[in-house]
Amino acid sequence: MEKYEIAVADKKIKDRFLEVVSERDYNREINFAIQAIRGNELLQKCDEQSIRNAIVNVALTGATLNPALQQAYLIPRKGRCCLDFSYRGLCKIAVDSDSVYDIDAVPVFEGDEFYYEMGLNPVLVHKPLMFTDSEHKKLLAVYAVATLHHGIKKFVVLDKEKIERAKKSSQTSKVWDAHYDEMAKKTAVKLLYKLLPQTEKMSQAVSVINEHEGLAVKDEKKAKEIMERFGLKKEEIEDLIDCPDADAMVKKSQCETCQKREINGQKCPAL
């Protein structure tokens, strides 16, 4: 048995799964995890503890690694296995955790009729331009809308500038390049999460995304938890800076924005 298979089959993982799902669901997700790792050489080389953490987070969030449903994925990043979600996965977590009745994200392309107002009486109107070549449409914005259980709707809108800012602050630029529209929709759903009734599964999902995209939390207690969970050293935690572009904590040594500033002879505003 390979090392990653031993990590996946860890008894602690099974015990954690069975706290929230049936043994049948546990066996199914473990099989999906092994299939994903077997098919990716970089995942096979990932730190074993990070593999365990990623799989436990599958149980904690209620998402599935079923490739046909495209909700969640195991992603290798800098020698660690990370759990990532699609916008579909985030929507499912919000609905299944009973936070909302319905939630979705929609892109706005050049030529669409689009108008919105915020304030006490929010308004959003979107009439897509029909019969155009969707592969060559220019993305202008993306919005996410949630319907709460009492019928009230909440929405957020991200224009192209905000979408680009989210891309630059993420450590998943290759994924953005390959799936730009999907990543933009996920960013909108993640932002909308902040306005919704919070549940444990939703909070865990956002925490997972923040950790693997290079966005850490700002308080010392949480930093200590991350150190213990991922085996980080104190100097690695101290390398975190409060990046104004990412609107979160990131590692200065890995921050693309800081690197670009240094090339241009500028300093990070957080330093």
Image: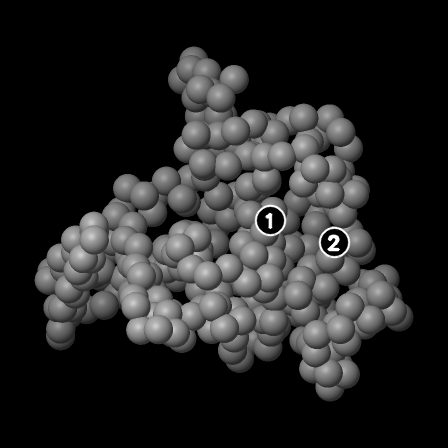
Badge 2 local density, few (<14 within 10 Å), some, or many (20+)? Answer: many
> Quick check: marks 1 and 2 in contact, CB under 8 Å?
no
Label 1: few (<14), some (14–19) or many (≥20) C-alpha neighbours in 10 Å: many
What residue is rendered at 55% in x and 34% in y? 249
Q: Residue furthest top?
A: 265
Q: Quadrant of the N terminus?
A: bottom right
Of the numbered discs in the image, which one, if any, rests on residue 32? Answer: none
In depth, the one of 48 and 2 nearer the eye is: 48
Q: Is residue 68 visible?
A: yes
Q: Quadrant of residue 252?
A: top right
Q: Secondary structure at mark 2?
A: helix
Residue nearest the viewer, comparing 54 with 97: 97
Q: Position of residue 231 (x, y in %)?
A: 79, 42
Q: CA distance from mark 1 to mark 2?
A: 11 Å
Q: Which three-letter amino acid code belongs to the residue tagged 2?
A: Ser
Q: Residue at x 60, y 58 (%)?
A: 204
Residue 50 tag number = 2
Q: Is residue 159 left or right of residue 150?
A: left
Depicted 163 relative to depicted 30: above or below: above
Q: Amino acid at mark 1?
A: His
Q: Position of residue 155 (x, y in %)?
A: 30, 59
- Disc 1 element: helix
Q: Residue at x 43, y 13 (%)?
A: 265
Taking the image as shown, residue 161 lies to the left or right of residue 8, namely left
| Colour option used | one colour
**Nearer to us in this view, 65 or 153:** 153
Q: Position of residue 130 (x, y in %)?
A: 13, 73
Which residue is identified by label 1? 212
Is 258 situated above or below 174? Answer: above
Instruction: Give percent across and percent down for residue 30.
Output: 74, 75
Residue 138 visible in the snapshot:
no
